[in-house]
Structures are given as structure tokens and as C-alpha cells.
Amino acid sequence: MVKWLALLEDRYHPAERSRHSLEAISRSIEYDLEILTRAEEFPWDRLKSYDGIVIGRDALLVENGVRTDKLWCPEERQQELADYVAAGGGLIAIHSGLAQYPKEGTYRKLVKGTFTHHPPGTRKLLVKSSPSANHPVTAGVSDWEINDEQYFIDMDGDPLILAELISEEGEAAPAAWAHRHGQGKVCVLTPGHTAETWAHPTMGRLIANAMKWAGQQET
């Protein structure tokens, strides 16, 4: 059975917003999913046993309820993650999986971007797929509306943008992109602040597609 690992939970994104939706998505495509909420339990010594990894947390550790400046994934570990993908592993970074990671670090280079800011609170957003992308991650996905944080991203290089988040004021920001890294694949989804977004059927379709693509089950 295809096996995935997910690391969730940070100061502003409790795992309960996403856990049940991720479990349901994995069941729907008959994948085995292991979910962790403690970064110290991340299985660095057996990454090769997973077809793919979901990162759904920011970079900073929390101690006694306070977010610190300590990284759960320091530079040498970021390199291990990049090596895992380069060897054929899949990586999906969702929402805060882009936040607070070092701007010059290997992880940023791996995902080809980093979160810079979002307008206060959540806002009504249109998630609009790029008609020219023609990519397995957005296969069968129509435009959809959500109330979520609109992440603005400092992009690296020229990854294939699969969808955009468009506000009612017309501001656009990347919603999804994908690229290859060595023999592996990386997909990034920027929505995901609210439980409602995670539970939306279209979000579920995107994540399922991303797992199949990044995990090498689809080309």
C-alpha cells in the first residue's frame, strides 16, 4: 500500500483543523497515512519508507505555549528532506508549510517560495485554476470559493502555477504550484487556514490528486 506521512500542528494552526480531512482523503484513495503533531517524532531515519510527506506546519517550535525562534527543521535536516525528494520522494507543503522557514534555506529552495504576509483575518476568495496548466494536480477541479487567509508568496524561479487565490478586490496570489526536484516531485497548496477549507470537497480533490502525482502514482 502507498504510504504517506503528515506533520501538522503549529502555534496558529492546530492539527484538529486538518487531521480528519486528511484521514478521509487518504481513505478515499486507499493510501496509508501516518499523522504526527510533534516535530521531535519526525522519523528522519526512515524517510525512505514513505512514498510522500505532507508538511502542514510552520518552521518554528512552540515551548510552553509560546512560539520560539527555534526551527523544527534546521538546515542540515532541510537538506535531508531535499535529498529524500531528489531520490524520488514526494512532498506536499500546505498553507503554513510555507511560513517562517529561513529565506536562504534549503527548504525554501525545495518548495520554490516562502510566505511573506496575508491581509488581516480571513477573506472571501475565488480559487481559480489556470486553464493553461493542464496538470494532474488540478485534473477535474473547477473554480471554487472559500473564506481563508490569502497568502502572498515570494516565489523562486518559475514553477508551474496551477491556480490562484483572487480576492473580491481583485488581488491575486498563488494558490497552487508544482515542480520536479531530481527524481521526486513537489506540490504546494497555499489555502488551509480554516477547517472549512480543509473539509471542502474541492480541496480534498486537490490534495488527493497531489498525493497521487507527487507519490509517483501519476506522471
Image (tube, rainbow, N blue to C red):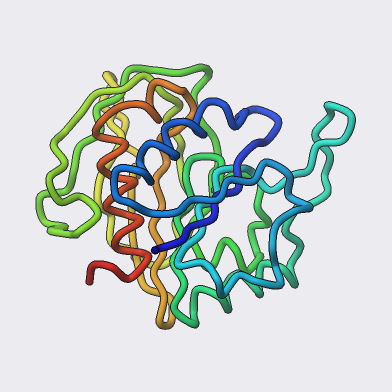
Say left or right for 140 vs 67: left
> Measured from the top left, where is residue 123 in percent x and y?
39, 17
Say left or right for 69 vs 167: right
Q: In front: 24, or 14?
A: 24
> Measured from the top left, where is residue 48 in percent x and y?
56, 75
Q: Is residue 195 above or below residue 74?
A: above
Q: In front: 182, or 124?
A: 182
User: Residue 152 falls in which quadrant of the image?
Assistant: top left
User: Residue 67 falls in which quadrant of the image?
Assistant: top right
Q: Quadrant of the C terminus?
A: bottom left
Q: In front: 153, or 56?
A: 56
Q: Which residue is painted at 41% across and 75% down in the image?
A: 184
Say left or right for 141 vs 108: left
Q: Quadrant of the N terminus?
A: bottom left
Q: Is residue 215 above or below residue 143?
A: below
Q: Which residue is painted at 25% across and 41% down in the image?
A: 205
> Measured from the top left, where is residue 183 in percent x and y?
40, 82
Q: Which residue is painted at 30% across and 48% down in the image?
A: 208
> Measured from the top left, where is residue 79 in percent x and y?
66, 74
Q: Residue furthest front?
A: 1
Q: Is residue 92 above or below residue 25?
A: below
Say left or right for 156 vs 209: right
Q: In front: 35, or 113?
A: 35
How many callouts does the rendering have?
0
Q: Which residue is painted at 45% across and 18% down in the image?
A: 122
